[in-house]
Amino acid sequence: LASILIILGLGVYVAQTGGLFRTGLLTQKHFLAKEYDKLSIKATVKFIDETHPTMKRMRRITLCDTKFNNNDLSFIKTIKMTCPAKTTENIKPGDIVDVFGKLTPYKIAAIPSAFDQKQYNTLINLDATGIAYSIKKVGENNNFKDIFAYTRRILTHRITEKMGDTAGGI
């Protein structure tokens, strides 16, 4: 019983303080406090994901190595943006793009122990989310790892095209 209480107490201590090294999960990151609209972002495309079947005309694009026209956002390095599918037709992973869009702060969980968007995105190293109004390719950055992301996207598209969204998604 004593060992269970010690383990429980240690668990509470680590959860509340970040442990002996004071490495709290959410305290190390900066987050958007307000919405930023009409931003110009220069970045490298990391991934392009197909969205849910109900959103056929939309895609999610993950951008890294971001540079902003607004110096207040220099802490943001990786962004996931939703955009119209036709804006990404000529874009592939590794391309350098100019994006015009808006960034939105993470939603706060409506009830305790509900999905926590801020914590989830921290765990997957995502600094911000938003909506891209337009995307323009300005260059290429041909890394070897980008070939795998491009191949994954092509295979996903072919599978869902032949098998349908439900079966192909599995």
Image (tube, rainbow, N blue to C red):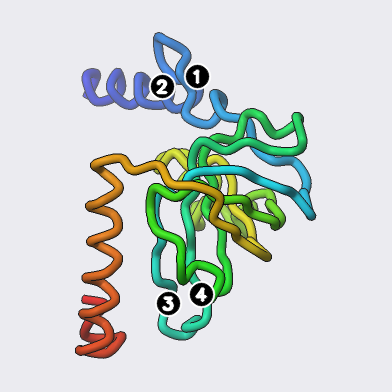
Dot 3 or dot 4, earlier in sequence = 3
**Residue at image mark 2:** 14
**Residue at image mark 3:** 52
Judged by depth in the image, the label closer to the viewer, 4 or 2, is: 4
Judged by depth in the image, the label closer to the viewer, 2 or 3, is: 3
For mark 2, does the 10 Å Cα neighbourhood hold few (<14), some (14 to 19), or many (20 or more) residues? some
Identify the secondary structure beneath mark 2.
Answer: helix
Instruction: Inspect the image, locate mark 3, and give the three-letter code of the amino acid beneath it.
Output: His
Circles 1 and 2: CB atoms closer than 8 Å:
yes
Instruction: Inspect the image, locate mark 1, and give the three-letter code of the amino acid beneath it.
Output: Thr
Q: Residue at x 21, y 19 (%)?
A: 3
**Residue at image mark 1:** 17
**Residue at image mark 4:** 85
The answer to whether residue 156 of the structure is visible from this angle is yes
Circles 1 and 3: CB atoms closer than 8 Å:
no
Q: Position of residue 98 (x, y in %)?
A: 62, 50
> What distance separates the C-alpha of mark 1 from that of mark 2?
5 Å
> What distance separates the C-alpha of mark 3 from that of mark 4?
12 Å
> What distance separates the C-alpha of mark 1 from that of mark 3?
38 Å
Dot 1 or dot 3, earlier in sequence = 1
75 with respect to 35 (left or right): left
For mark 1, does the 10 Å Cα neighbourhood hold few (<14), some (14 to 19), or many (20 or more) residues? few
